[in-house]
Amino acid sequence: MDPCVVDIPFLARLALIYGIILPTRPKKSAAAYKKVWTDRGSPLLFHLVDLKAKVAEFLQKDSKEKFHVEAAMRYGKPDIESVLEKFKAAKVSEIQVLPLYPQYSLAATRSSVLKTQEIAEKIGLKARLNFLPAFFEEANFIEAFAEVAKKSLAGFSHDYLLFSFHGLPERQIKKVEHGSGTYCLANSNCCDTIRDENRDCYRAQSFATAHAIAQKLGLQKSDFNKKYSVSFQSRLGRTPWIKPYTDLVFEELVKKGVKKLAVICPSFVADCLETLEEIQIRGRDSFISFGGTDLKLVPSLNSTDTWVQAVAEMARSS
């Protein structure tokens, strides 16, 4: 029922959630989660816990300042309120909040920011909050993903590299446009560069992330569509979502002669249902069913050393 996530009028949202989603989605989601569950539980959770511990250790190692590091989930536990209460009890003077979404969106970033502000105001901490911006082109983030990709693909002779980002309804892209409302999605080139009108556009930021990582991997923008491209996954319902769609791109690439495909998912900084089940399991099966021979998912950043350092430096420099 989060209006940032399902951004339609209340009564329509109520009907959608309780009439369609809740009767069908839990069973499907449970089956998908079962495929990726581990001895430590949810990959998303234990990667977050590991990241928190390593960032805390890194910050305390060579700093004269004292850092108190916690991790919270927008939905689930550890929850935002319990973490803010820990900061309050510890009398923390300033709270740096890093939404772990590289590209800005209403559904993820805005929702998390609003919830954190709401709880902080309730317990008297709002004045201490400082939100770090989306880090879609932050140098250390790009370097971390490129490093993971190089190691992962060292023994995999892929024909093509696909950057698959989580999708969003097109209406959410249009809602964050700055200007007259006639720029976003008006033509096929609107996301090629970041301009004032689309500075908060998730799709444009996704393309910027992909191009930056590709360049670190030795590819240039002139290689776009020849050796790599961008797509968007996880769409739901009949409303238009941002394109191109990952599941359709799989089939298109096979028709173009691609047999061995590498996939990077840079909208996720931790491996989760969308990377492990949707791409590595279901996506691979789909790609092979179309005639491909293999698909390899590049692991996410999780709690790799380079990513730990990147998070720590973002916190210190803000």
Image (spheres, helix red, strand yellow):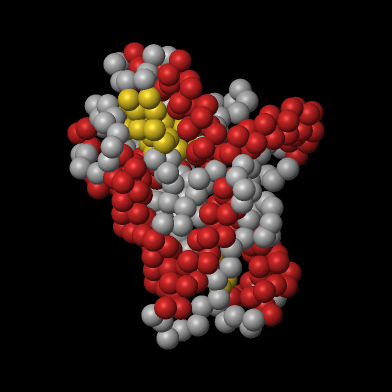
Q: Residue 38 location, x and y as percent?
A: 60, 45
Q: How many marks?
A: 0
- In the rendered image, residue 185, in percent from the top left (x then y), is placed at 43, 32
Q: Residue at x 59, y 80 (%)?
A: 92
- The location of residue 165, given as percent across then percent down, is 45, 38
Is residue 10 visible from the viewing direction of this image?
yes
Picture quadrant where residue 263 is located: top left
Is 146 rendered above or below residue 22? Answer: below
Q: Quadrant of residue 69?
A: bottom right
Front residue of 91 and 154: 154
Residue shown at 30%/34% (left/top)? 156
Residue 266 relative to residue 98: left or right: left
Left or right? Give the position of 223 relative to 27.
left
Left or right, 163 with respect to 33, comes to left
* Residue that extends furthest to the front in the rendered view of this protein: 39
The residue at 35%/32% (across/down) is: 262
- Left or right: where 240 falls relative to 136: right
Residue sitting nearer the eye, 73 or 115: 73
* Percent coordinates x, y for residue 67 in the rendering: 51, 78
* 21 lies above or below 307: above
For image coordinates 58% across by 68% down, the residue present is 70
Q: Quadrant of the rendered structure where residue 1 is? A: top right
Q: Is residue 242 visible?
A: no
Q: In the current view of this chain or complex, which residue is farthest to the bottom?
A: 64
